[in-house]
Amino acid sequence: MTVIHSRVGWAKTYLKQAGLVSQPRRGVVELTQRGLDLLQTNPEIVNDECLSKYPEFRAFKVRSRPEVPPEPVVGPPPTPAGSPDEQIDGLAAELEADLRSTLLSRIVAASPEFFEQLIVDLILAMGYGGSRADAGERIGRSGDGGLDGVIREDRLGLDQLYLQAKRYQPGNRIGVDAVRSFAGALNDVGAQKGVFITTSSFSPETMAYASRQQTKRIVLIDGERLTKLMVQFNEGVRVQRTVEIKRIDLEYFDGPDSA
């Protein structure tokens, strides 16, 4: 990757996180109304200080470096804090935060059928169902209020894990009625284990309801945890490059023959 390609890519990422541009489809970037409004002010430069006026960009910076509280930008750009190792860790976290944000955007823009298959693939990638070709499948249809996927955890199908997928825009919380309906669907098939996955989040009442279930185990996975699992288990992502960081081999220099 060339330097100019990398810097243009990050400029696009930062503008997108601030809500100034959008990507309606692959290879296309367009200004949002917020971006047009900013241009009307004739800004001298668009940098981190300028973008920090937008809460979405500040939230992105916090997500990418949760261990470092955001500091107000005053005067010239500050010298990077921390050791080189800490700076690398921070930049890696920022890369992952952008990746997870992009993943969520792509999932929300995809079809319900794609999302249903994605969660089946993810649960299989996590090791449930083993390596059998028929260990999991998509069984639902969008809007039917039923079950969207099943994972057969043993060859005879005696132990089955059912899945529910809800592809909502971030900010639209899943209410307790949706999970209550999922629990009823589990009862209908005599199942005791289910995973409810959404691209948005769950209300506190919904999480409390799921934790109160005594006869069945219902796990709730929101959009943030979903993308973390996708990155962890390499579902929908791939390694772009690997950077080796080497250290002095102290045993080589401090061995018995080094004196």
Image (spheres, rainbow, N blue to C red):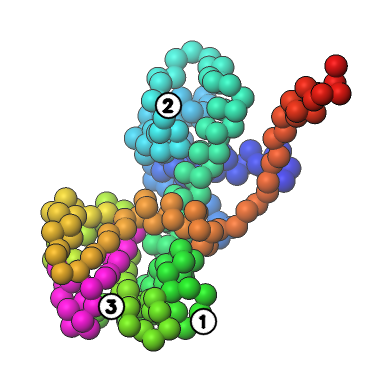
- Say whether residue 135 is left or right of residue 202: right
Query: Residue 224 placed where, x, y %?
Result: 37, 51
Sequence-earlier tag: 1 or 3: 1
Q: Determine the secondary structure under disc 3.
A: loop
The one nearer the camera, 250 or 145, is 250
> What range is drawn magenta here?
180-200
Q: Determine the secondary structure under disc 2.
A: loop
Vertical position of residue 53 compared to residue 173: above or below: above
Residue drawn at (65%, 41%), measured in percent from left and top? 6
Residue drawn at (22%, 83%), measured in percent from left and top? 189
Report the disc number at residue 147. 3
Query: Residue 243 placed where, x, y %?
Result: 69, 41
- The answer to which quarter of the image holds residue 89 is top right
The residue sitting at the bottom extreme is 156
Sequence-earlier tag: 3 or 2: 2
Q: Which residue is mark 2?
A: 68
Crowd band around label 2 with a 10 angstrom C-alpha radius: few (<14), some (14–19), many (20+): few
Vertical position of residue 151 compared to residue 224: above or below: below
The three-letter amino acid code for the residue at tag 1 is: Ala
- The answer to which quarter of the image holds residue 245 is top right
Query: Residue 202 placed where, x, y %?
Result: 23, 55
Residue drawn at (54%, 42%), measured in percent from left and top? 95
Q: What is the spatial separation of the Cα atoms under label 1 and label 2, in whole angstroms?
A: 44 Å
Q: Which residue is mark 1?
A: 133
Report the disc number at residue 56. none
